[in-house]
Amino acid sequence: MQSTSSLTSKSRISAGLMGKSWLLPAEKTMLTVALAAGAIDIVLILYKGSQVDWPGYATILAVVAGLMTMGFFYRLSERSERIGAASISAGLFIFFSLCLSMFNYLLLPLWREPIDLGLNAIDQMFGYSWPAVIEWAGQNPVFNNIVRFAYLSTVPQIAVIIVILGITGRIKELNILIVTVTITATFTIAFWGLFPSLGAKSLYDLPIAMEMLASPVVSTAYGDEMLAMAKEGPGLIRPLEIKGLVAFPSYHIVLAAIAVFAARTVKWVFPVYLALNALILPGIYMHGGHHLVDLPAGLLVAAVGLYVANRVVNNHYRDNKLPEFLPN
C-alpha cells in the first residue's frame, strides 16, 4: 500500500497542476477554440441552411461527454491525475476535431478558385508527376499496402499517444501536444479558407487500370467529388463520412511530425512512431493525392506550431514550478 506521505505528495502535485480550475491551461485553450469553432459552425449552418446528420454528431458527443466525465471524476477525486488528464485530453481532441472538421466543410462552396494550378506548376518545375507516383505504387504492391496502413494510422496515432502520455505521467508533454494540435489545425484550416487547394488528384483523370492497381486511399473519384463540393457545397454533412479537404499544407504531415515529437520521450513507443511516420512521407503522395510542395509546407507548419507550444507550456511549467513528470 502507498504511504500517507506519498498520497499527500501526489495530492499536492495535482493541486499545483490544477490550481482552482477543473482544466489545465492547455486543455482550456483547446476547449476554447473548439467552442468558438462550434459556435461559428452553428451560425453558418443556420445562415446557409446546411443539412447535418445530427444523430451522428450526437453519438460522438456522447462519447466525448463520457470521456470528460470520467476524466473529471479521476481528477477531482484525486484518484489518478494520470487517468484524468488522459481522458480529458482524449475527449477534448475528439470534440476539437469534430468542430474544426465541420467548420472546414461549412467553408464549401469555395469563394474562389483553388490554387492547385499554381501548385501543379511548381510540381512540374521539380519534375514531380502525381500520375507517375500512382503508376509506381501500382507496380510495387507490397510497399504500397504498407504505406497505405501508415497513412491511415495518422489520427489514431494521435489518440493513442494522448492516452500513453497521460497514463505514463508525461502531463507536460501531453499539454504540448494538444496546444500544438490546436495551433496547427486552426491555422491550417484558416489558411485553406483563404487559399483553398484540393490536391493533385483534382487535376488528373487516371487510367482505370492504373488506379485499380494502386488503389489509392484518396482517388480521382474523390477528387471529382471535392470539385463538385467546391462548386455546390457539401450536401448532407455526416461526421463519419468527413474526409480531409486540405491539400496545402498537408495536415497529415503536420500530425505525423507532432506524433513523432510527442512519442520521443517514450522509449518503447518512439521507434514504432518513427517508422510509421517515415512511411507517411511517401504516403501523402501515393494515398493522399498531394502536390510536391504540400509536404515541406506541412513540416513548416508543424515546426512553428511545436515551437510556439513548447515555449508557452514550458514557460507555464517553469513559472509555476510544476513537475514535468507526474508520479504514479
Image (cartoon, helix red, strand yellow):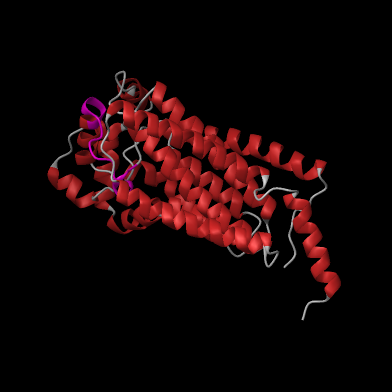
The residue located at (66%, 60%) in the rendering is 75
Q: Position of residue 268 (x, y in %)?
A: 60, 65
Using the rendered view, name the quadrant where residue 53 is placed. top left
The residue located at (54%, 42%) in the rendering is 181
Q: Is residue 142 magenta?
A: no
Is residue 102 shown above or below 120? below
Observer-nearest of 300 and 81:
81
Q: Is residue 296 visible?
A: no
Outermost residue toward the right? 5
Is residue 261 shown above or below 124? below
Observer-nearest of 11 and 215:
11
Is residue 293 shown above or below 86? above
Using the rendered view, name the quadrant where residue 97 is placed. top left
Q: For the C terminus, which image quadrant?
A: bottom right
Which stretch did the figure color magenta?
A: 229-243
User: In the image, is 309 to the left or to the right of 9?
Assistant: left
Q: Position of residue 169 (x, y in %)?
A: 68, 61
The residue located at (27%, 47%) in the rendering is 216
Observer-nearest of 93 and 60:
60
Q: For the N terminus, which image quadrant?
A: bottom right
